[in-house]
Image (cartoon, rainbow, N blue to C red):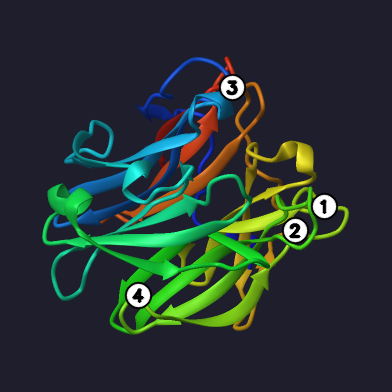
Amino acid sequence: MSITALPTLPSYDGAEVVIEAPGDGPGNWAGAASAILVDGVYWLTWRNRRPLAEGRGVTVDVARSTDGVHFETVAEVSRDIFGCESLERPVLIALPEGGWRLYLSCATWNSKHWWVDSLTAATPEELPQGSRQVVLAGDDVEAVKDPVITAGADGWEMWLCCHPLTEPGHEDRMTTRRLTSVDGLTWDDHGVVLAGRAGEWDERGARVTTPIGTDLYLYDGRPDAASNWFETTGVARWDGSRLVPEAEIAPITSPHSDGAFRYAAAVPLPDGRIRYYVEAARPDGAHDLVTVVR
């Protein structure tokens, strides 16, 4: 795949704020979003995150919009539903058979463990009271979170962020695994397909965030443990068995504070362009959820 064949990538230039951070300063983040366009309506879900001492990821919101910028919240899910310490990236799916499913990334209290849970309901508004089912439990060896999920005629596909728990103090490391499913609840694991590269900007870990075209994906990476929570965005291509980073493309960053430009979500538009949603650092160290069309 040549670089000239890439779609236009997101950047901070011209970005509009969709959801402001829940407070000022570092640790206040709105983002980790996913988005879809269904029958002309944008559906967006994201987590609201406070600093560590103030609760971390306390809620996930689901909202709708007709223009992709101005959203009306229709449902809010609290971490209390799952008895978890924090929530991270959610995923909203309009089910092929009808109804809606919200996937949640949930942190186990007083540990580095994460698992993926779900709520299924007839409408987005009913999701907080929806049917709950654990999707991926993780284990003592590996934490699982931040899935990227698609459902189509060929079945379900997931790109799953995994954190090893075997070395205390190094749980921030991350790789991406590929999984498939026939129903979106029971998944077959096909192994690690993307990992950090020694000596590169993504050495400490690599997490798929969104497809952007045939066999092309954006992913988050960081060079070291100190950059945890401040990931930036790169591009990788699927070669049939693994994801290969486009080495010629520099990581995309915010020009502000910690430089974070992460958790990108891409919505293909009818005119061939892409609307991106990205969690991006602002000057005071908080992260806003922003959007750009490219």
The residue that label 4 is drawn on is 185
Kind of residue at disc 4: Leu
Q: Are marks 4 and 2 in contact (CB under 8 Å)?
A: no
**Could you give the CA–CA distance between mark 1 and mark 4, rounded to whole angstroms?**
35 Å
Kind of residue at disc 3: Pro
The residue that label 3 is drawn on is 26
Of residue 184 and residue 41, the one placed in the foreground of this image is 184
- Where residue 269 is drawn, which disc sits there? none
- Compared to residue 95, the image places residue 124 above or below, namely above
Q: Residue at x 28, y 33 (%)?
A: 69
Kind of residue at disc 2: Ala
Q: Nearer the viewer, mark 1 or mark 3?
A: 3
**Could you give the CA–CA distance between mark 1 and mark 3, rounded to whole angstroms?**
26 Å
- Answer few, some or many: residues within 10 Å of disc 3's Cα (few below 14, many 20 plus, some between 14 and 19): some
Q: Position of residue 78 (x, y in %)?
A: 32, 41
Q: Position of residue 112 (x, y in %)?
A: 63, 51
Q: N-terminal of the two: label 1 or label 3?
A: 3
Q: Is residue 42 left or right of residue 228?
A: left
Place residue 231 in its image quadrant: top right
Of residue 132 and residue 19, the one placed in the foreground of this image is 132
SS state under label 4: loop
Q: Residue at x 34, y 75 (%)?
A: 184
SS state under label 1: loop
Q: Are marks 1 and 2 in contact (CB under 8 Å)?
A: yes
Quadrant occupied by the N terminus? bottom right
**Could you give the CA–CA distance between mark 3 and mark 2, rounded to whole angstroms?**
30 Å
- Where residue 200 is drawn, which disc sits there? 1
Q: N-terminal of the two: label 3 or label 2?
A: 3
The residue that label 2 is drawn on is 247
- Answer few, some or many: residues within 10 Å of disc 1's Cα (few below 14, many 20 plus, some between 14 and 19): few
